[in-house]
Image (cartoon, helix red, strand yellow):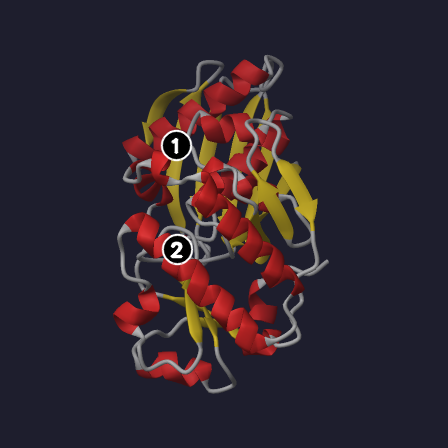
Amino acid sequence: MQSFYSHGKLLITAEYAVLKGARALAIPCKKGQILNFKSKESKYLDWESFDVNKKSWFTARLHLPSFSIKESSNTNTAKKLSAILRSAKKQNQHFLVNEGGSVETHLEFNQNWGLGSSSTLISNIGLWANVSPYKLLEQSFGGSGYDIACAQSHTPLCYTRNGMNPLIESVTFEPPFKEHLFFVYLNKKQSSFTAINSLNIELINQELISIVNSITKEMLNCLDQSLFDKLIIEHERHIGLLLNQTPIQQLLFKDFNGAIKSLGAWGGDFILASGNTETPQFFYGKGYKTVISYSEMFFKN
């Protein structure tokens, strides 16, 4: 059996702006996705995906070598999977030439959390097929590619988009106040694909990119939580102007003692809350039950 593993991800700075080449700070998560492949002589590839509770949520049988769908539990998901595998085949003609078999994928985090169920799948298929995951991403879900960089990273990183050859820098991000940083799930799944396509990317100008780059650099070197909070608020203000949206703290959490930042596509998934030891109780009291500490969230090699 062949086995592949990719980490989930969170984007700390440069949401949206990363699409036009802003330097983004991103961190691989402790939890990710596993892909196991067992080969056998068969003209089919049998696929089964399991969620965090080990419950099967998707099955398909694909005919080889075309990856045409013979049967599936969800036609749209099967079509997307088939397209990704065909794209991998175009990059590597030797992929699944004389063998079929079975695939199992296992998610380690809640599918709705936005930690990268798609990007970890793309990364694992790229490893399995020995092809570029960035090309697979470009031809399937789209996006900046920072999530692909996180999938195989063992450290926090700074990511600068550059076609199929992004600049990926391993960095240290261990703020001394990290025990006061929390990640809160907003009980709402947000589609990065929809968010990207609803934005006029031409509005991301060089001035905004320079501002975001400066904030990313300062965050990496920040040793003082009050300054970190100011950087969060400044970042939120500029991205809010870009999107013509009100930052989440002003919208929902005006009474929070600290600073709050959206992560990734605005309006759902996780937020970063810079607060204190009482922060989890604040969000529990407002009905947000998923509050994860910095050390629980991030992978550390």
Residue picked out by circle 2: 238
Identify the residue at horizontal 58%, vertical 19% (top origin): 96
| Distance of label 2 from label 1 (alpha carbons) | 44 Å
Residue 100 drawn above or below residue 20: above
Quarter of the image with the C terminus in it: bottom right
Identify the residue at horizontal 42%, vertical 29% (top origin): 140
Q: Amino acid at mark 2?
A: His
Callout 2: helix, strand or loop? helix
Residue 229 drawn above or below residue 150: below
Residue 107 in sight from this viewpoint: no
Asked whether the beta carbons under mark 2 and mark 1 sit within 8 Å of each other, the answer is no
| Residue 152 place in picture, x, y as percent | 64, 44
Identify the residue at horizontal 36%, vertical 34% (top origin): 202
Residue at the far right in the pictured view: 301
Callout 1: helix, strand or loop? strand
Residues 116 and 211: in front is: 211
Residues 210 and 54: in front is: 210
Within the image, what quadrant is residue 233 found in? Answer: bottom left
Residue 27 drawn above or below residue 181: above
| Residue 62 place in picture, x, y as percent | 42, 24
Q: Where residue 266 is drawn, which disc sits there?
A: none
Q: Is 263 on the left or on the right of 166, as rendered?
A: left
Residue picked out by circle 1: 60
Identify the residue at horizontal 40%, vertical 53% (top origin): 111
Quarter of the image with the N terminus in it: top right
Within the image, what quadrant is residue 250 found in? Answer: bottom left
Callout in the foreground (2, 1): 2
Residues 99 and 154: in front is: 154
Q: Amino acid at mark 1?
A: Ala
Q: Residues within 10 Å of mark 2 (few under 14, many from 20)?
A: some
